[in-house]
Image: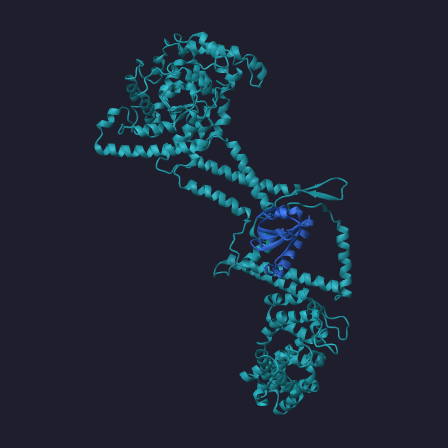
Amino acid sequence: MLFFSFFKTLTNHTITVELKNDISIRGTLKSVDQYLNIKLDDITVLDELRYPHLSSVKNIFIRGSVVRYVHLPAAEVDRGLLEDASRREAANQAGKAK
Amino acid sequence: MSFFGFDTTLPRDEPRSGKSKGIFEAQDPFAQVRQARKLQAFQDTQEEPLEFDDTYDGLGDKLEEAGDDFNDDTFGGGVEAGTISKGQISKDFDFFGQTAQVSSAIEEEQLRYNLQQQPKASTTTAQTTAQKPKKTGYEKYQDPGYIPEIQAKSSVWGTKPQARNQEEQPERISTASSGAPPAKRMMSLEAVEAAMRAQSQPVPPPQQVLAPDHTQNLYQQSVPMRQYASPDLQQHPMATQPQPQPTKPIQYHQRNASKQEAIKPAQHPIQILQNPNRAQHSPQPSQDRGTIQDTQPSRPSQATPTIPVITHPQQLMQLSEEQRKAYLEEDARRAKRNHKIFLLSKGNGLMTPQDKNFITRIQLQQLVTATGNSGDADPEATLAEDFYYQVYSQIRGAPRQHPTQPLGHFAQTYLLQTGGRLNNRRQAVNGDNHMQRMQQQVQRAVEAAKLKPKNKQLIIEGSLGKISFSNAKTPKPLLNIKRPESTDSKPATGKKANAEVRSSDRKSVLRNLETVYQDLMQLEDHERQMPPPPTAGDVEAAQTHMEWRQKTQVLNSKLWRDLKVLEPIVPGSTVPHPFIAFLSFAKGKKSIPRIFRHIDQEQRVTILTMIVVHLDQLDVISRAQIAPGESHPPPLVREEIELFSQVVMPCLLGYVSEAPINIIIGLLGLVLDHTTVLTVAKTKIGLGILTMLLSRAELVKESGDVNDEDWQQWTTLYDRLFDTLEPVLGALFPGPVNTSDDMYIWQFLAAVGIGASPEQQQRLVLGVKDRVMETVMQSRTLPADMSSQRLSNVNLFMRAIGLDVELLG
């Protein structure tokens, strides 16, 4: 749930989602669920010339499984907290694995 | 008519006129139950806002228990009350056998019935036709000459047989209701209409077809404006409607107006007659559920709202103006409420209680799984699962609500809402029941969820791992490879042995670091759970507080152990001290402020001492030595230095700025004795720490509470330091003059200058004179703001020894 928890804090911030088919979409993250499905608003496609069919799309729902990368706004990430959250997650996982 | 005598016509599709209202027009046999309960509830809670449950609930209980009333009729097996088949047909659900007998059984039953009740009126032919699928039971009414038997009906009502004309009906009914409170009010037309609208009449059981007089009776009792008119019936409206229309509404109302007690005696015979079986073998489940349900499901007239008994229009005329007004008001209110009931009841019966329970169960299970198993359904678990988000939104003040409330919260809210609603009701019989069921449901769901977690994984024999099922928390669990215990434990012991030997290799240092972080998080968690300070006399609170403190202590000592500050110092060892190694990682540096929050002063001074003793081993000092020809340490080191001065120095400073002089003396002594001062002094951090110590000593001296002995000691140390540094004063500056970042050096020089004797000040000035002049010269070529910046740095030092750059011209 770390990623879910993490992405939830990015709602209403602009992120860039790179899909597994190489399309990169930038938009405002509206919501994310535990499958890391993503809802973006006001999207723009980075390489619009190659993907003109998306130029008229304003908002988009991305299935979590097709996402390759999510580019984060660095200012919105609390690294220390993220480190701690990762530690907790790891501890949880370790606890569950036993 | 359909198989069970139901019609699919919806109430709203129904013609609302006073046209023929046969018994079978109401197609839903359970509508009566509903209706009865609704109205009963309405009646019982007259003063209260309409409750949805009242108009809605409990239906299914009826369904289950009462719904099989007609099975006998359908399958021919239920004539046990009759003369023939009680012994013959077992209850073993031999449907085939029973169905085979159905036609004869029904026929016989009908025969018996008609013979008993109305030897005159019934014609066997009519009854036999009634067995055909399309029968309505009203065939005989199609004969215009047919006159239903009224007398039997009248006798049922406990009145003497009377003619069936409309003038006499009201009277008869008013006698029936004479036991009720005196009639005060008369229905207004709207009220009557509204009441009727709200009162949709369901179908009595099919057997009633066979007793025309009874159907007639029923019909008179409950003339509904909106009937579920079956197409068949509408073909012969007049035949079923021997009575003139105008009186009907009133009659109906009168029926309802009379108190239940007045009606009951009359009803019973009818019920028994209409369905002999039922009175014997189908006890109503509702009857033990309280007043609301003590009526037979198929008895429309039992749902008697507490309408003031106005048995005759003329009664209204006799009322005083006031009374009439009050009555009309009441009436309007009632009409309004009836209308509301009607509106609310539109969707009635769409879902059976079983359906509702099913949905509720799904929802509850969803709630349970949404937070995982209920065992960790507390805020802590939420925090563990959703740590980043929760803390982040706290830190950044996210206005959003936490979307993942723990289950307990959810379920409680849900239940409390229901409870709150119920508390407002005087009659919570029904609701309590509902509530209890809800609670049980929640409990069951929770328990089920507790039992479940083991099923989250499926281990196929012979496979390497287990397959996990997804839930809301772990939507897509991967193959969960089982870790053999042996591989886990062996390295652990091996590592331990290793750790003894090489406690400072990179891996083990990193591992130590993580342990420290774990400890820190535990401590922080623990801190969050701090019980409120105990009030005097509250033994239990004091007890918990004590326990909490003890736990804190344990965690603290664990943290302290894991920090390895007190590992023995091995002089001359090439392996750095574990704590110093710890500090060489950015993570370690960052942890210092957090650690300082949890340790006491003594531990802080120990850490400070540890750092000072190993000053020249600190990575920010040892690696920050500037190679010849360079003006900066490598970028990575600079980052570390930056981090150290931002994170660790404030902590140390925080302590030093309150430290007594003897600590300062001790620390300076350690620097001089244990470290290479020249190395230390050539770095930003080293100079920073020296500046810290020197300026603190100066401040303490100025505050006056330093005894001479201490001061003597301090001066000696200071002299040693000065002597050591004097030759390299000019070399403290890392780069040429144009290096902008030299403020810390001027600060250090200032700190040295303040404490220096006049003779030392002179030597100091001599040592850095060149640099001062260069800087001043260079600053003249710089833009104004940079120039003033440089000059003010220099001035920092100059003023400390009583000079000013202005004097330099």
Chain B drawing hue: cyan
**Count of number-bearing discs:** 0
Q: Quadrant of residue A74?
A: bottom right
Q: Position of residue B458 (x, y in %)?
A: 70, 41
Query: Residue A37 versus residue B755: which sits nearer the camera?
Result: A37
Instruction: Tell me how the rendering is colored.
Output: by chain
Q: Quadrant of residue B97?
A: top right
Q: Position of residue B99 (x, y in %)?
A: 56, 14
Q: Is residue B692 visible?
A: yes
Residue in the picture at 50% in, 24% down: B67
Q: Position of residue B508 (x, y in %)?
A: 74, 63
Q: Is residue A75 above or below residue B645?
A: above
Query: Residue B184 versus residue B404: which sits nearer the camera?
Result: B404
Q: Position of residue B157 (x, y in %)?
A: 34, 18
Q: Is residue A35 visible?
A: no
Query: Residue A82 versus residue B235: which sits nearer the camera?
Result: B235
Chain A drawing hue: blue
Q: Is residue B103 shown left or right of residue A21?
A: left
Q: Residue furthest bottom?
A: B759
The quarter in which the C terminus of chain B is drawn is bottom right
Q: Is residue B595 above or below residue B97?
A: below
Q: Is residue B540 above or below residue B433?
A: below
Residue in the picture at 30% in, 24% down: B179
Q: Is residue B112 above or below residue B510?
A: above
Query: Residue B497 versus residue B630: which sits nearer the camera?
Result: B630
Q: Is residue B19 shown left or right of residue B61?
A: left
